[in-house]
Image (tube, grey):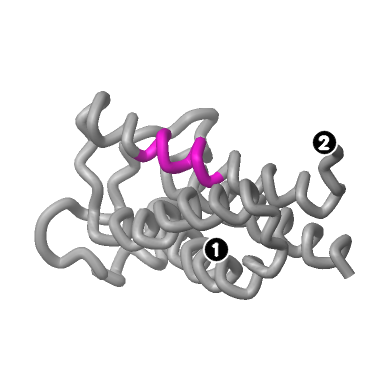
Amino acid sequence: MSVSRSALFLYFAWFVAVVATLGSLYFSEIRMFLPCQLCWYQRIAMYPLAVILGIAAYTNDLKITKYALPFSIVGGSISFYHYLLEKVPGFASVKPCSQGIPCDVAWINWLGFITIPFLALIAFVMITVFLLISKKLSK
């Protein structure tokens, strides 16, 4: 069975969503990093992508882009904002997480700039790009 190039990019998007989902579960369930409120919003955007992109890739449904793109764009926007809270001092006065786990705490800080919201942002951007490429190739 031959897979079209557009379907291949759909598989790539699904793979990134699965890795991001498993990564978030690793950080919270194995490393015991408690997710803040913004982390939960990012998960709300990512977890369904792992499911719907998997179903779309399996059934070769290239029309999934119009349903999946809003999740990846909204999730990416939240990740970007969360990353700014962690890294830009001017954003520290904004307190979206007024109760519970603070949103400006970086649980990891690899190479001085890679944090969990940064990893989520990269995943959302990759999913968005793969979906757009898949859509363009399917036309």
Q: Does the magenta segment cover residue 7?
A: no
Q: Are marks 2 and 1 in contact (CB under 8 Å)?
A: no
Q: Which residues are magenta?
A: 17-24
Residue to which mark 2 is pinned:
1
Callout 1 amino acid: Ser
Q: Nearer the viewer, residue 28 or 14?
A: 14
Percent position (x, y) of residue 70?
Answer: 54, 73
In the rendered structure, the answer to whether residue 24 lies left or right of residue 56 reads left
Looking at the image, residue 131 lies above or below residue 101: below
Spatial separation of the CA atoms under disc 2 and disc 1 = 29 Å
In the rendered structure, the answer to whether residue 35 lies left or right of residue 16 reads left
Q: Does the magenta segment cover residue 20?
A: yes
Percent position (x, y) of residue 11?
Answer: 68, 44
Q: Residue at x 25, y 25 (%)?
A: 30
**Residue 72's mark?**
1
**Residue 107's mark?**
none
In the rendered structure, the answer to whether residue 30 lies left or right of residue 82 reads left
- SS under mark 1: helix
What residue occupies the far top of the structure in this picture? 30
Q: Quadrant of residue 37?
A: bottom left
Percent position (x, y) of residue 91?
Answer: 39, 66
